[in-house]
Image (cartoon, rainbow, N blue to C red):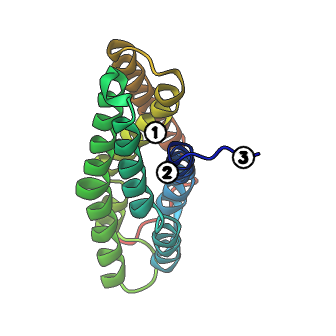
Amino acid sequence: MFDLSLYSVVLLVHIASAIVLVGSALFAPLTRHAILRAPTVNRLGDWLDFLHRSVRANPPAAMVLLASGLYLGSAGWWSQPWFYVALGAWVANFSCATFVVKPSVVALARAAAGAGSGPVGPAVDGLRRSLRWEIAEGVMRGNDMAMLYVMFVKPSAAESLLVVAAASVASLGIEWVLTRRMTRAEAPVLAS
């Protein structure tokens, strides 16, 4: 009745891990904007704790995505050029998460913990408004959206690269607009 091959099971695991990562990428701007709007250090700490808890599954999901993708590649995808674009996007996301986003969040959490309580001060505010963090998350979100297209359509290398570039630019543009729409009235009053 059911015809479950190893390939089918690995494909299902691959898609499930992609869902975890794409879901996290889509939800991340809401958390980031809450972090940007937090008026007090205590509220900022609450949002940082929420962020920490909400992304716990991302590193294992990323490794499962890579491992299952490599297995699927060995089943015939290695001969297709889109596969290497997808692998490159995975490496880019891993690099952004490991070398930009995580250190930015850790530095902010340390600064917030050292700031005590009360309104968010300029030093902590500067860390939470990190342009590097914003760009890295935008690139990662763009890559995640592009990989959905690439996984299902399996286009040429040129089309895959174009989709990745366009998705990253679109994601960065959307993030830039949404972040700048926060009016001064929404922005917290900073401690002197």
Which residue is the extreme one toward the bottom?
A: 116
| Separation of marks 1 and 3 at Cα, in angstroms | 31 Å
Name the image quarter holding residue 119.
bottom left
Identify the element where label 3 is drawn. loop
Dot 2 or dot 1: first in sequence order is 2
Q: Which residue occupies the foreground of this view, 154 or 77?
A: 77
Provide the secondary structure element on which disc 1 rests. helix
Looking at the image, residue 130 lies above or below residue 124: above
Chain-order first, disc 2 or disc 3? 3
In the rendered image, the residue lying farthest to the right is 1
Q: Is residue 184 visible?
A: no
Residue 122, percent across and down? Answer: 32, 65
Q: How far from the left and from the top, in percent, is residue 127?
A: 31, 61
> Which amino acid type is shown beneath numbered disc 1?
Asp
Q: Quadrant of residue 81?
A: top left
Return the residue at label 2: 21
Nearer to us of marks 1 and 3 is 3
Instruction: Specify whether residue 66 is in view.
Output: yes
Residue named by callout 1: 144
Between the C-alphas of marks 2 and 3, the distance is 28 Å
Q: Nearer the viewer, residue 44 or 185?
A: 44
Lower position in the chain sequence, tag 1 or tag 3: 3
User: Marks 2 and 1: CB-CB under 8 Å?
Assistant: yes
Up the image or down, 29 lies above or below 149; here it is below
Badge number at residue 2: 3
In the foreground, 187 or 102: 102
